[in-house]
Image (cartoon, helix red, strand yellow):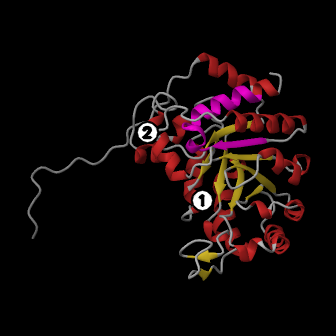
Amino acid sequence: MGQLDLFPRPEPTSVAVEPATVPEELRDLASRLPASVRLGTSSWSFPGWRGLVYRDRAEEAELARDGLAAYGRHPLLRAVGIDRTFYAPVKAADFARYAAAVPGGFRFLVKASQACTFPALRGGAGAGNSEPNPRFLDPAFAADEVVGPATEGLRGQLGTILFQFPPLPAALTRRAAEFADRLGEFLARLPAGPLYSVEIRNRSLLTPGYAAALAPAGASHAFTVHPSMPPLPVQAAVVGLERQPALVVRWMLGHGRGYEEARLLYEPFDRLVAPDEASRSSIASLAARALGLAKEVLVVVNNKAEGSAPLSVVGLARAIASSAGR
């Protein structure tokens, strides 16, 4: 028999995460943004956002579990990305808990499983000794493991399901037309209803054929600020903003840095370390054009874009309000 515990440990308790006080100037700014403009961040569990999003400092695990409700009370944060779905399945009940934590007008960008978009297993897209991934662009797998749980749990608060492709190997990028055809077939066989978005990381795949592959399924190109992709105006010239069902933007990484370098430079993500005025202006311009075309706007920002995603959202909101004449 084991020794009796004379001093039992208390059960861990969940401490409510409270929102930070929002300056009146930001509340006024939020009131000037159309309801169809939803800005947010790539995730919400960053202790460095104390005073920006959260009232008190909390650990990352606490914020991941309990921080979304506080995040959703910030008037400028009307959307968020769910990245965990990229690495492992999420059940409909988990999605439903997310939806219940935020206001009805809030929207989620859900990243599809990497199994849908990585052509090789174990070692990434370009590893020579990797095995082919049988789930690559498999619509049945995507429907069952990605689309079904997200739509059941989030319902009307699902903004878009994003299929993010990694930098693909030359065997695929040399045949851009074949990739576009296969992508089009994949999208056409997904369940109707959700907005699907596609993010590519190879310039060579950004072709009129790629744009044409999106259209039949009503899918959107995910405009991406990332060193691997051309500037946003170039992307818009190829895919045509007027042909997109909505404007979906991910402001990920600037200044030619890699993610790890940016993380080391920018942590704890509580200030703008490397302001990127050019990208902010380009996103605001696209948003103003999309509003003129009566399209929904969904933009999520990564901490690695400028150093602090919530502060990038504030700057972007100001730029959009200015560009839209509000």
Tag 1, which secondary structure?
helix
Residue drawn at (58%, 35%) of the image: 274
Percent across and percent down for residue 239 are: 87, 54
Looking at the rendered structure, which numbered label has been put on residue 47?
2
The main secondary structure of the magenta stretch is helix
| Amino acid beneath label 2 | Pro
Q: Nearer the viewer, residue 71 or 1?
A: 71
**Is residue 191 depicted above or below 16 in this figure?**
below
User: Which stretch did the figure color magenta?
Assistant: 297-320
Q: Earlier in the sequence, mark 2 or mark 1?
A: 2
Q: Nearer the viewer, residue 232 or 44?
A: 232
Can you see residue 105? no
Residue 72 on the magenta span? no
Percent across and percent down for residue 179 are: 80, 72
Residue drawn at (47%, 27%) of the image: 51
* Left or right placement of residue 25 versus residue 297 in this view: left
